[in-house]
Image (cartoon, rainbow, N blue to C red):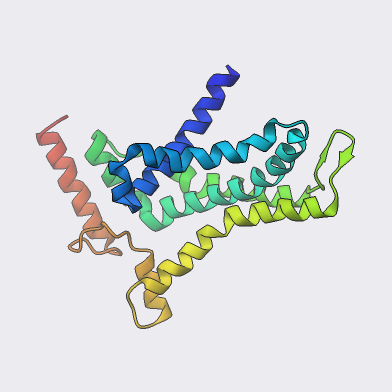
């Protein structure tokens, strides 16, 4: 069970990393062995210290600072982006095109309000209940705590840095225009205005009519 659970949690993250590199660098996709080597070799080398006698102390330190702060923050951001930036209506249209039915209203309500609220509460409570890391009776020195916070920072920093880069590279003369354009999905058709809710509803009705005429 533990081996299956470990593979089940490891393979998706490695596949996401591999596909991201393949999308950004199409030449690597033609050399799959090189792409796999780029992904797996650093993971293998970074995991070797955990197999030593002191590996449990390194593993505890990494687990202490890499699980709660980054994961909870990313969960909140993902819910907000999916439900409020991309929008439930667009998500409804996507699921209607793929599966022939829209998202249940209770699930949309959870994505927009309940899940981000619960994750934010857990995130804030984790900071309130923060304690310095320890393993058994061993308390980590201050320099190890600094390394732990740097681990969390390095995991969180790429997201806001990439956001600033996207806003800077987006079209517009003012900061407000750049910010609005940065939040527009790149693959949205130009004939469907981003803020035209009525237009999106008409598009949903058209897709619904098409699905009823040509069922899956």
* Furthest residue toward right: 137
Question: Does 37 sit left or right of 140 as displayed?
Answer: left
Residue 45 or residue 145, whichever sits in front? 45
User: In the rendered image, is residue 104 in sight?
Assistant: no
Q: Percent position (x, y) of residue 59?
A: 71, 37
Q: Percent position (x, y) of residue 172?
A: 33, 78
Residue 57 or residue 189, whichever sits in front? 57
- What residue lies at 24% left-to-right and 37% top-to-bottom? 98
Q: Percent position (x, y) of residue 45?
A: 58, 39
* Furthest residue toward top: 1
Q: Percent position (x, y) of residue 15?
A: 42, 37
Q: Quadrant of the N terminus?
A: top right
Q: Quadrant of residue 51?
A: top right
- What residue lies at 45% left-to-right and 43% top-to-bottom? 38
- What residue lies at 39% left-to-right and 82% top-to-bottom? 174
User: In the rendered image, is residue 74 in sight?
Assistant: yes
- What residue lies at 51% left-to-right and 53% top-to-bottom? 77
Residue 70 or residue 154, whichever sits in front? 154
User: How many dots with numbers?
Assistant: 0
Question: Does 31 sit left or right of 128 as displayed?
Answer: left
Question: Does 181 sit left or right of 139 as displayed?
Answer: left
Query: Looking at the image, is 28 positioned above or below residue 180?
Result: above
* Furthest residue toward bottom: 173
Query: Looking at the image, is 5 positioned above or below residue 28?
Result: above
Q: Quadrant of the C terminus?
A: top left
Q: Quadrant of residue 44?
A: top right
Question: Does 206 sit left or right of 40 as displayed?
Answer: left
Q: Quadrant of residue 181?
A: bottom left
């Amino acid at each position: 069970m533990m081996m299956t659970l470990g593979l089940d949690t490891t393979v998706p993250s490695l596949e996401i990393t591999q596909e991201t590199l393949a999308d950004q660098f199409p030449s690597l996709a033609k050399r799959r062995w090189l792409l796999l080597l780029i992904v797996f070799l650093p993971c293998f080398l970074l995991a070797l210290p955990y197999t030593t006698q002191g590996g449990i102390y390194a593993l505890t330190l990494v687990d202490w600072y890499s699980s709660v702060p980054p994961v909870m923050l990313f969960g909140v951001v993902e819910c907000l982006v999916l439900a409020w930036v991309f929008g439930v209506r667009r998500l409804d249209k996507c699921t209607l095109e793929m599966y022939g039915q829209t998202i249940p209203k209770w699930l949309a309500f959870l994505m927009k309000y309940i899940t981000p609220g619960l994750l934010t509460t857990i995130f804030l409570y984790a900071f309130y209940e923060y304690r310095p890391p320890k393993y058994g009776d061993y308390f980590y020195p201050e320099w190890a705590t600094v390394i732990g916070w740097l681990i969390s920072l390095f995991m969180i920093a790429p997201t806001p840095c990439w956001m600033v880069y996207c806003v800077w590279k987006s079209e517009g003369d003012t900061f407000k225009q750049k910010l609005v354009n940065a939040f527009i999905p790149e693959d949205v058709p130009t004939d469907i205005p981003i803020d035209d809710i009525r237009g999106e509803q008409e598009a949903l009705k058209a897709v619904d009519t098409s699905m009823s005429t040509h069922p899956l």
